[in-house]
Image (tube, rainbow, N blue to C red):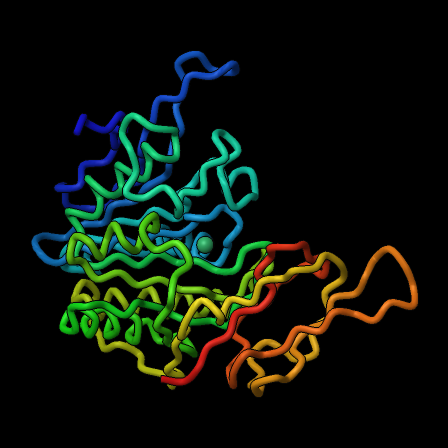
Amino acid sequence: MSESPITASVDYQRDGIQHGFLKLPHSHDGSAWGHVMTPITVVRNGEGPTVLLTGGNHGDEYEGITALLKLSNRLQPEQISGRVIIVPMLNHPAVLNGTRTSPLDGGNLNRCFPGNPAGTLTEKLADYITRYLVPISDVVLDIHSGGKTLDLLPFAATHRMNDKEFEARCLAGAAAFGAPYTLFMAELEGDVLFDSAVEGQGKVFISTELRGGGTTTPETIAIAERGIDNVLRHAGVLGGEVETLPSQALEIPDGDAYRVSEHAGILEFTVALGDWVKEGEVIARIHDMHRTGTAPQEYRAPYDALLIGRRHPALVNVGDTFAVLAVPR
Ligand SMILES: [Zn+2]
């Protein structure tokens, strides 16, 4: 495979703290020899494990972006042993645009892995992450949240694996994050996710969802910041004990947990995020926007479950995932 067109202005092997960029050539009407400049911070203090911390994989998920921008201001080399690589705004054009995907090529970074060095801008970025950043990392924490269209209970997540020893190591990492919920996810599109690119290299991958709605709260930022420090301690990069807190163990059992709308209209939830629902219980109604006197469509829970995610906007279309369910494990 050919070399990446991306060059880093930081030296991953140098001790100290460096703030720089991943520079990806991007020739366009506004700048003939321009670049996509992805901000990156490297903090290194001698030999030791490497933790890669990423936010803004989707550009409208502000919990990770904010917590990692703050970390890049506060983390000092003398506090760590080993190396911390911080990329708070992984899909930087999307972050600048306030959108989930890149306005430059429509790229949804977390559907572009493992990437392609000769592909679109977003595929080139995914390829650099897969072939240059992940191989030098031991643990990867990728902080997501619901973005503008979803609101999800704050959880850290990993996946069921065939290799149970590896599954246990990944679950220990997710549990160390210390979110109020710790989850095994069943993914809709596993092969093209950042998760798969990391797990395929035998590295511990931890992801999160920390509310959303296109904003942050003091609570979600606190969960993100505590979780980052906990993962750094768990990896042995930062001193001190992991701050353990009660966390409920959950699992997304199957694809049915993602409830998809077959109607367009006004979405009315009859249960709240974090409520337990019974099999057959109405969880939402969708109201017709074109006439009065029409009974709403009712959507019911397929099994006893916890409502861990909901669509944030009230307007819903055919095909939208409007509710996400999980069960205890
Ligand atoms: Zn995301």
Residue most extreme to the right: 292
Q: Residue at x 30, y 67 (%)?
A: 159
Residue 178 coordinates in the image, percent (x, y): 35, 76
- Quadrant where the C terminus sits is bottom left
Residue 138 coordinates in the image, percent (x, y): 16, 57
- The residue lying toward the viewer, choosing from 17 and 68, is 68
What is the tally of numbered marks visible in this picture?
A: 0
- The residue lying toward the viewer, choosing from 236 and 287, is 287
Residue most extreme to the left: 47
Q: Residue at x 41, y 48 (%)?
A: 57
Above or below, comparing residue 150 to residue 89 in the picture:
below
Q: Residue at x 74, y 66 (%)?
A: 286
Above or below, comparing residue 118 to residue 256 in the picture:
above
Left or right of residue 220, residue 273 in this image: right
Image quadrant of residue 320?
bottom right
Left or right of residue 134, residue 278 in this image: right
- The residue lying toward the viewer, choosing from 118 and 90, is 118
Residue 217 coordinates in the image, percent (x, y): 56, 66
Residue 74 coordinates in the image, percent (x, y): 35, 56
Left or right of residue 290, residue 103 in this image: left
Q: Quadrant of ligand 1?
A: bottom left
Left or right of residue 236, residue 192 in this image: right
Image quadrant of residue 168?
bottom left
Q: Residue at x 38, y 66 (%)?
A: 186
- Quadrant where the N terminus sits is top left
